[in-house]
Structure formats: C-alpha cells, structure tokens
Image: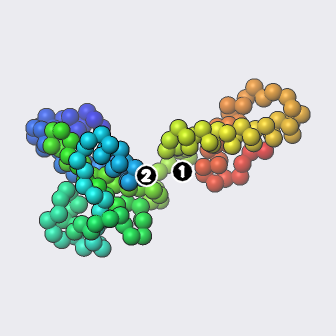
Amino acid sequence: MLGHLRQERDRGGPGSAQGLYLIVSDIKAARDELLGRGVEISEVFHGAGEVYAGTDEPYLFGRIRVSGPDPDHRSYRSFASFKDPDGNGWLFQEVTARLPGRVDADDTTFTSSTELATALRRAAAAHGEHEKRTGGQHDVNWPDWYAEYLAKEQAGEPLPL
C-alpha cells in the first residue's frame, strides 16, 4: 500500500493524495495518540444522516459533518481528519465490527499484544485442564492445541477439550 501511495504522490506532487482512509478500532484512542505526537487533527465527527450534499472536507463525498461520534456508535460512521507533513489528506474511520463478507471468518486477529496475552492465558488455563483429562502427560503439540483454541474462541465455535 505504501508503494502505491508513493506512486500517487510522485504523480501529483506533495499533497496530491487526498481522502486516504486509516481504519481504527478506537477513534478516540487513535486521535489522542496523534494529538500526543503533536499532529493537528480534527475533532471526531459523523455524517448527517444519509444525505450526500455540501462541501465539507476532507473527502466524505460531500457528506455534511456533525460534531462528535455517531450517536448510535455504529461501525463505519465516526471519523477524524488530518494532513500529513506533505499535505496529504487522511481520514480515520472507526470500524468496530466488520460488515459480513469483509473479513475472512477463518482469520484470527487480535487488536493489541495485551488482548493476545489475555487470550493465551485463557488457552493456557484450558490446556492445563486438557492435560489433566489426558493423564497429566506433557503435550508436545501444545502450540497446535493453543492455536485451535484461540481460533475457535474468536470464531465463537465449540472449544477443544
């Protein structure tokens, strides 16, 4: 993706790439992080209904901005905008739940090392119970068992015994 952005910038010069989306799971935290780094960024905003009229920037296809996050906290509806040092226009978009078909259901993802560590602790506790049921013998395939446990847990499927 970065190579593509560099090509676009090179074609049109600095600041020519506008309306670039960065998807974040927590728009307030992402905005606070940029503010902490000295980046000038808009307040969080959402669009006014489904009306696509007006001249608001950046790059919501004319959607009229309303201050604050989406009142129903719906995914894909809250934004914050900023420009990078070259003048390219970026838009944070908060996505907390992907629309059907947007993510491979077989993928297992974690949004932070803390979330992954917590999941590994749950898997370790469950694996300890598994080893008790199998006679307390060391399971040399424990990484496979953990991987299956984590993937099934995130997919909401029955957990391995």
Tag 2 secondary structure: loop
Q: Is residue 148 visible?
A: no
Left or right relative to 56: residue 155: right
Residue 140: quadrant of the picture: top right
User: For this rendering, which residue is in front, 137 or 86?
Assistant: 86
Seen at 38% across and 53% down, the residue is: 27
**Looking at the image, residue 80 lies above or below residue 48:** above
Q: Is residue 65 visible?
A: yes
User: The residue under label 1 is which amino acid type?
Assistant: Ala
User: For this rendering, which residue is in front, 86 or 61?
Assistant: 86
**Looking at the image, residue 55 lies above or below residue 34:** below
Residue 126 got which mark? none
User: The residue under label 2 is which amino acid type?
Assistant: Ser
Residue 17: quadrant of the picture: top left
Q: Can you say which quadrant of the picture contains the N terminus? A: top left
Residue 25 got which mark? 2
Residue 105 got which mark? 1
Left or right relative to 89: residue 47: right
Answer with mark 2 or mark 1, whichever residue precedes in sequence.
Answer: 2
Left or right relative to 69: residue 122: right
| Identity of the residue furthest to the right in this view | 135
Mark 2 touches mark 1? (CB < 8 Å): no
User: What x and y, as percent, mark residue 36?
Assistant: 32, 43
User: What x and y, as percent, mark residue 58?
Assistant: 19, 56
